[in-house]
């Protein structure tokens, strides 16, 4: 197994979280560093594959459909301060 390059870093962590992580590392017979590495790698992988929740996106689409006429009316009748109606209209 090839050794990966490592870099030192310092950060401030909530004391309860740090204590819990240290306890977990001890219980598993691992070093704190390896547990933190694993947790960060899992977080990165999770964020790469994350997508918006379906119910949130459905609510957003429903809001757009429900209030589309209002947003269009506001854009046409109340342009931006600089008078750029086209930008306001395109944004709706």
Image: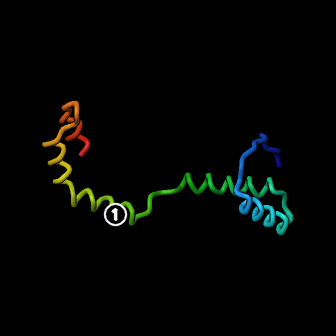
Q: Residue at x 68, y 53 (%)?
A: 40
Residue farthest along the top direction in this orientation = 82
In the image, 14 versus 70, the foreground residue is 14
Q: Residue at x 55, y 52 (%)?
A: 48
Residue farthest along the bottom direction in this orientation = 27
Q: Is residue 58 left or right of residue 78?
A: right
Indicate whether 81 appears above or below 77: above
Tag 1, which secondary structure? helix
**Residue bearing the label numbered 1:** 58
Colouring rule applied to residues: rainbow
Indicate whether 20 appears above or below 77: below
User: Where is residue 33 shown, x and y percent of the image?
Assistant: 80, 53
Quadrant housing residue 35: bottom right
Q: Is residue 48 left or right of residue 19?
A: left
Indicate whether 43 appears above or below 74: below
Q: Residue at x 26, y 42 (%)?
A: 91
Within 10 Å of disc 1 (Cα), the crowding (few <14, some 14-19, many 20+) is few
How many numbered marks appear? Answer: 1
User: Where is residue 86 shown, x and y percent of the image?
Assistant: 19, 35
User: Where is residue 7 shown, x and y percent of the image?
Assistant: 77, 40
User: Where is residue 17 shown, x and y percent of the image?
Assistant: 71, 61
In the image, 88 versus 57, the foreground residue is 88
Q: Residue at x 61, y 54 (%)?
A: 45
Quadrant housing residue 75: top left
């Amino acid at each position: 197994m090839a050794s990966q390059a490592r870099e030192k870093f310092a950060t401030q962590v909530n004391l309860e979280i740090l204590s819990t992580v240290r306890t977990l590392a001890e219980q598993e017979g691992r070093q704190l560093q390896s547990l933190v590495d694993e947790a960060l790698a899992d977080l990165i992988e999770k964020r790469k594959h994350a997508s918006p929740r379906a119910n949130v996106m459905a609510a957003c689409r429903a809001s757009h459909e429900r209030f589309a006429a209002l947003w269009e009316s506001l854009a046409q009748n109340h342009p931006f301060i600089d008078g750029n109606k086209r930008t306001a209209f395109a944004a709706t």
